[in-house]
Amino acid sequence: MDIASLIGSLLGIVLIGVVAAESCHGHWAMFYSLEGVLLVFGGSISVCFMALPMEKVKSVPGFVKRFIFAKGKSPVEVIKLMSTLAEKSRRDGILALESEFEHCMEVDPFLAAGVRMTIDGLDSATVEQTLRLEILAMQDRHKAGKKFFDLLKLYGPGYGLVGTLIGQIGMFGNLSGGDVGTMGHNLAVAVCATMYGTVLANAIAGPIGDKLALRSGEEILNREMMLQGITSIQAGDNPRITVDKMAAFLPKAGREKLKAA
């Protein structure tokens, strides 16, 4: 569970709920508009279907799960793991990594693939090329996930504006009749649609997309370090050299944390 995502989500819900409660004094129905829900949420999702291939849309639940749950290891943990592999390879030979394959698979299939190719004796250029293609493919998948939420962030407020205009047109169209109830309903549609679009963009889609981009950067960093570690192990470098190559990806604070570990 990503504690930061949980805290942020709960805090946002509580703050909106408190302000809404103070405004409505128990009359929660005033914040509900079926027309606004259909137009803003339904319309925004329709845009995503138009803009993205179906297989990308089907992957959205997995990206939401990634927002809530953080299963990746920290850079320090990755470096410690690669250091262990480097020491074992240096001491017992490359083939000794066979016993670590299952553990590597549990940590990251990317790492397991690199270890497998190393054990099989592929040359370093082939291993690096293959793993870099895997990193590029991963980046493309992550971009597709962020794109879905970027579309919601972009078009949610737009559909809210459409709802506002429709509600205002309906209100103005009933001015001659003098039906206050009808005009009030149309005005509620207009205001609720604007609120739904704003909440969708700024309290849901925007933060999720930004967190996914951050997660993607972390995973790319981890895999780049794994790649450097694997190529260093293949070259027969001293384990300390292997660690230094991976530590180059960390900021100064991260290197101090690594030393402390």
Image (spheres, helix red, strand yellow):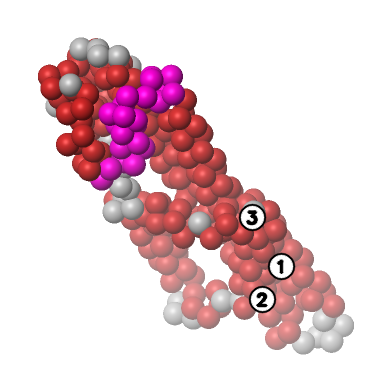
Q: Nearer the viewer, mark 3 or mark 1?
A: 3
Inspect this view and state whether residue 249 appears. Answer: no
Q: CA distance from mark 2 to mark 1?
A: 8 Å
Disc on res. 6: none
Under mark 2, the amino acid is Glu
Label 3 sits on a secondary structure element that is: loop
Residues at discs 2 and 1 in contact (Cβ within 8 Å): yes
Under mark 3, the amino acid is Pro
Under mark 1, the amino acid is Gly
Is 92 or 16 nearer to us in this picture? 92
Label 1 sits on a secondary structure element that is: helix
Residue, disc 2: 35
Mark 3 and mark 1 lie on one chain; the one further toward the N terminus is 3
Residue, disc 1: 163
Q: Could you say where residue 69 lies in the image, as x and y percent from the top left?
A: 33, 53
Say which residue appears at 13% left-offset and 22% top-offset: 92
Examine the rendered structure and indicate whether residue 23 appears above or below residue 103.
Answer: below
The magenta-colored residue range is 105-128
Is 43 or 135 nearer to us in this picture? 135
Inspect this view and state whether residue 167 appears. Answer: yes
Disc on res. 53: 3
